[in-house]
Amino acid sequence: ANMSHIAAEYGLSPYLSLGATFIYSRAVTTFKNPLTSSQDTVTEGLDDPDFYAKAQIPLAVGSLKFGTELALSIEKKQQTTTTKTNAASGGSTLTPYVGYEFAAGPVLLGAKLSYDIYVGEKTFENSSLGFSSTTKTTGGNTTSFSLFVEIPVNILTFGGAVKVSQTT
């Protein structure tokens, strides 16, 4: 997969910032069938742009972090041939989150909880078989919980995260 990633974030204060992320991606998936030849499927285009607001408040020995993310679909999901699909999701999502992070010596530990409070109708248009069909789906709210750790080693920082998600 190839991705071009542009992100911008502006700090309105030490405790509040606004930002946006734009990703153009191209992914090739090869399906192999022992009875027939293999076939490549290409997903390419602009992913849903992501706009966000982040805030933090010092609390006890760490910081309470909260904010919201808006993934704004600018086009419907389209499959134009049996092997080509665009990268848009076809629907928008609004996801607020809350978390807490703190330092334990040189190590940074934290947790984050998020929930999709709005999942817009997703539109998928398939014109790969010579005729056009449109499918619309609703729902699919996701609740996510993650734990993370960052450990500085000399001039590098190593980190890891565990995330559990459930979509309803």
Image (cartoon, rainbow, N blue to C red):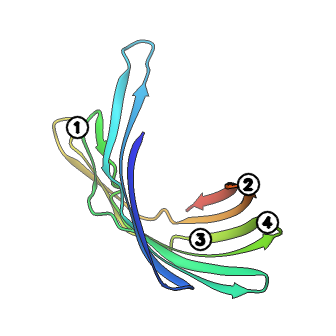
Q: Where is residue 110 in the image (x, y as percent from the top left)?
A: 72, 68
Q: Distance between the residues labelled 3 and 2?
A: 33 Å
Q: How far apart are marks 3 and 4 (CA)?
A: 27 Å
Quadrant placement of the C terminus = bottom right
* Circle 3 or circle 1, nearest the eye: 3
Q: Nearer the viewer, residue 92 or 9?
A: 9
Where residue 154 is drawn, which disc sits there? 2
Mark 3 residue element: strand
Q: Name the residue under label 3.
A: 114
Q: Distance between the residues labelled 3 and 1?
A: 36 Å
Q: Distance between the residues labelled 2 and 1?
A: 53 Å
**Looking at the rendering, which quadrant does residue 74 occupy?**
bottom left
Where residue 106 is drawn, which disc sits there? 4
Mark 4 residue element: loop
Q: How far apart are marks 4 and 2 (CA)?
A: 11 Å
Q: Where is residue 148 in the image (x, y as percent from the top left)?
A: 70, 61
